[in-house]
């Protein structure tokens, strides 16, 4: 066995182990970032829902105030609010207020839904990155790279060193002419 062949094999092994370890660390780090993003996205979903309910309640209070002002104004003028145009005005106010409140709630549900989808995507990414990290084995990658390097050089070392060695020792012997070699 040629010990020279072990040098590039060892270098390939340690290089592959280092690279593989870095890839594993990177995958774990990206998985943790995705987990954190999922948590933040979950908070954003809850916040969107909470803000939507608060905005809907605020709007209902404003509609109630507008309706109360309408009733007071109509009553102060002696108009019966139980029939005709006055009743239609109050009914329109109620209908428009409910429609707007429903739209506010629907918008907040859609915003929450978007954050829920995003949370799921971040969780999927975190799981995928953890699975990737779990499947990276720096020791095995190093052994495979070292063995491949050793075998690709035929177990004789790098081609350059091996070729130089062969050329140095495989030269034909110098020829010496003797008298018997001379043609008479």
Image (cartoon, helix red, strand yellow):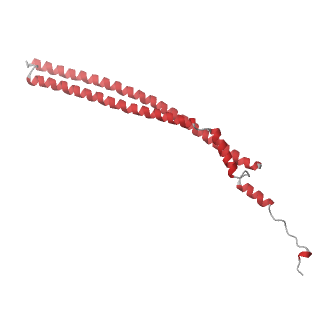
Position of residue 101 in the picture relative to residue 23 (left or right): left
Instruction: State whether residue 123 is above or below residue 152.
Output: above
Locate residue 62, reporting x and y percent: 23, 23
Position of residue 75 in the picture relative to residue 163 (left or right): left
Locate residue 76, reporting x and y percent: 10, 18
For image coordinates 73% across by 49% down, the residue present is 5
Quarter the C terminus occupies: bottom right
Q: Nearer the viewer, residue 4 or 58?
A: 4
Q: Nearer the viewer, residue 123 or 22?
A: 123
Instruction: State whether residue 161 is above or below residue 126.
Output: below
Instruction: State whether residue 54 is above or below residue 161.
Output: above
Count of labels in the image = 0
Instruction: State whether residue 41 is above or below residue 11.
Output: above
Locate residue 46, reporting x and y percent: 38, 26
Q: Nearer the viewer, residue 138 or 51?
A: 138
For image coordinates 56% across by 36% down, the residue present is 133
Of all residues, the one furthest to the right in this rendering is 179
Locate residue 130, reporting x and y percent: 53, 34
- Which quadrant of the structure image shows residue 10? top right
For image coordinates 19% across by 24% down, the residue present is 94
Of all residues, the one furthest to the bottom in this rendering is 184
For image coordinates 52% across by 36% down, the residue present is 129
């Amino acid at each position: 066995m040629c010990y020279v062949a072990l040098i590039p094999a060892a270098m390939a092994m340690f290089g592959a182990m280092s690279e593989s370890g870095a890839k594993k660390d990177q995958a774990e780090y990206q998985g943790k970032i995705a987990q954190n993003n999922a948590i933040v996205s979950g908070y954003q979903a809850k916040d969107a829902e909470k803000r939507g309910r608060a905005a809907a309640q605020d709007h209902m209070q404003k509609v109630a105030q507008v309706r109360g002002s309408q009733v007071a104004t109509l009553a102060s003028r002696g108009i019966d609010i139980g029939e005709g145009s006055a009743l239609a005005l109050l009914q329109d106010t109620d209908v428009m207020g409910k429609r707007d409140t429903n739209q506010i709630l629907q918008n907040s549900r859609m915003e929450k839904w978007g954050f829920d989808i995003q949370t799921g995507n971040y969780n999927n990414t975190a799981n995928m990155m953890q699975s990737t990290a779990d499947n990276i084995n720096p020791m095995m990658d190093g052994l495979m790279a070292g063995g491949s390097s050793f075998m690709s050089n035929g177990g004789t070392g790098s081609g350059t060193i091996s070729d130089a060695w062969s050329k140095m020792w495989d030269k034909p012997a110098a020829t010496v002419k003797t008298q018997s070699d001379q043609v008479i």
